[in-house]
Image (cartoon, rainbow, N blue to C red):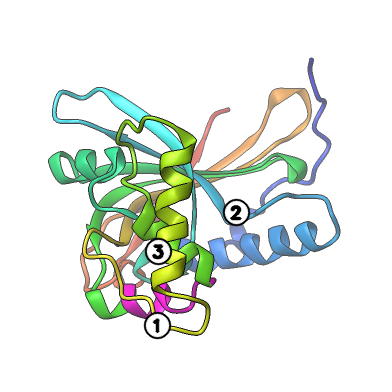
Amino acid sequence: MREQYRAEGIDAEALAADPMTQFGRWFREAAESAMLGGLYEPNAMVLSTADEQGRPSARTVLMKQYDASGFVFFTNYRSRKARELSANPHAALLFPWHAMARQVHVTGTVGRIAPEETAAYFHARPHGSQLGAWASAQSEVIASRDELDRAWAELNARYPVGSEVPVPPDWGGYRLAPSTVEFWQGRGNRLHDRLRYVRIGEGPAAGAAAWRVERLSP
């Protein structure tokens, strides 16, 4: 089970000055590939966290926003990932765009976004997803699927379509502010291109930082 990559490489001279601008270029191309059926959910990313003892865990979440400050995702504040981020705010992201022979690897620190940002996104979600955020005590053991379905049905009766669903107090957004962002392009003979931005400056946002670009051996 081996694929021989034949994609064009990464031209270091053509890279953007900062990683979030470069990510935007690649993400637009990934979204275009998804529209043509070549890639599924380009905003899906693997989030890796670790607890206070350094034991790692990983799961796929959806990136809902990116800008100069970093990458935003949403979850239950009592979930496993949230508990681990509370104990250890260092985390990693991976965008696995296999259909394009591309990956983006990100490391950085994670913090909660402002409540008003969470509220704006929550109320833009589909009605069923809003109820789902209330119905699920994420990562907790439940007796059966029926328990989850009953909770959702009760919420649906309390907040029918067209009514405003309040934001759950234990649900909201996180932003990962990157310290490194690596762009990986598959090449022939396993001699892949790997170019990594490393943050070397400080600023109010990741985009205000200075960045060094390194080429890594595959």
- Residue type for callout 3: Leu
Q: Which residue is mark 2?
A: 12
Residue shown at the point (23%, 74%) measured from the top left:
114
Left/right of residue 175 with respect to residue 149 in the rendered view:
left
**Residue 213 located within the stretch drawn in magenta:** no
The quarter of the displayed image where residue 54 is located: top left
Q: Which dot marks residue 155?
A: 3
Q: Which dot marks residue 164?
A: 1
Left/right of residue 207 with respect to residue 187 in the rendered view:
left
If you read the primary sequence from the N terminus, does the residue marked by circle 1 or circle 3 appear first?
3
Q: Which dot marks residue 117?
A: none
Query: SS of the residue at dot 2?
Result: helix
Left/right of residue 189 with respect to residue 120 in the rendered view:
right
Which residues lie in the magenta part?
118-126
Q: Residues within 10 Å of mark 1 (few under 14, many from 20)?
A: few
Q: Residues within 10 Å of mark 2 (few under 14, many from 20)?
A: few
Asked whether the viewer can see residue 17, the reply is: no
- Residue type for callout 1: Glu
